Amino acid sequence: MSHTTLQKKKLVARISRLKGQMEAVERALEAERPCGEILQLLASIRGALTGLTGEVLDDHLREHVLNAADDASRAEAVEEISEVLRTYMR
């Protein structure tokens, strides 16, 4: 069973909170709130998304690299992480 399946309830709850934060930005824009307030909301979203990304990445490293069934599986997991990091760093 995948680590994301095992943590599904917790991960989905974090996504729900992120959706709520995005909706708060939309409401703030519609209400023409000050830009400082909107920037603070956006910073909160970025922090929440970074935290979620870190959690899934950490679980991936532990499950698919540290506890890999064999060297081929480990190499595949490392390549997946490498691709994600290249995309993330753009």
Image (cartoon, grey):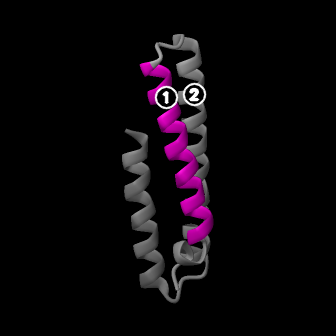
| Residue at the front extreme of this rendering | 31
Dominant SS of magenta comes to helix
Image coordinates of residue 66 in percent, x first then y, are 61, 76
Instruction: Look at the numbered discs 2 and 1 and tell me whether their residues touch, using CB distance below 8 Å.
Output: yes
Q: Which mark is residue 41?
A: 2
Image coordinates of residue 57 in percent, x first then y, are 55, 60
Q: Depth check: 48 or 66 in front?
A: 48
Specify which label sits upstream in the sequence, 2 or 1.
1
| Residue 53 visible in the displayed image | no
Quadrant housing the C terminus: top left
- The reply to whether the magenta stretch includes residue 61 is no
SS at badge 1:
helix
**What amino acid does circle 2 point to?**
Leu
Label 2: few (<14), some (14–19) or many (≥20) C-alpha neighbours in 10 Å: some
Above-or-below relation of 68 to 53 = below
Label 1: few (<14), some (14–19) or many (≥20) C-alpha neighbours in 10 Å: many
Q: Which mark is residue 25?
A: 1
Q: What's the distance in space between the residues labelled 2 and 1, CA to CA? A: 6 Å
Query: Going 56% across and 70% down the picture, which residue do you hit?
Result: 8
Query: Going 59% across and 54% down the picture, which residue do you hit?
Result: 14
Image coordinates of residue 7 in percent, x first then y, are 60, 71
Q: How many marks?
A: 2
Image coordinates of residue 28 in percent, x first then y, are 50, 22
| Residue 83 visible in the displayed image | yes
SS at badge 2:
helix
Which residue range is magenta in the image?
8-30
Q: Depth check: 50 or 11 in front?
A: 11
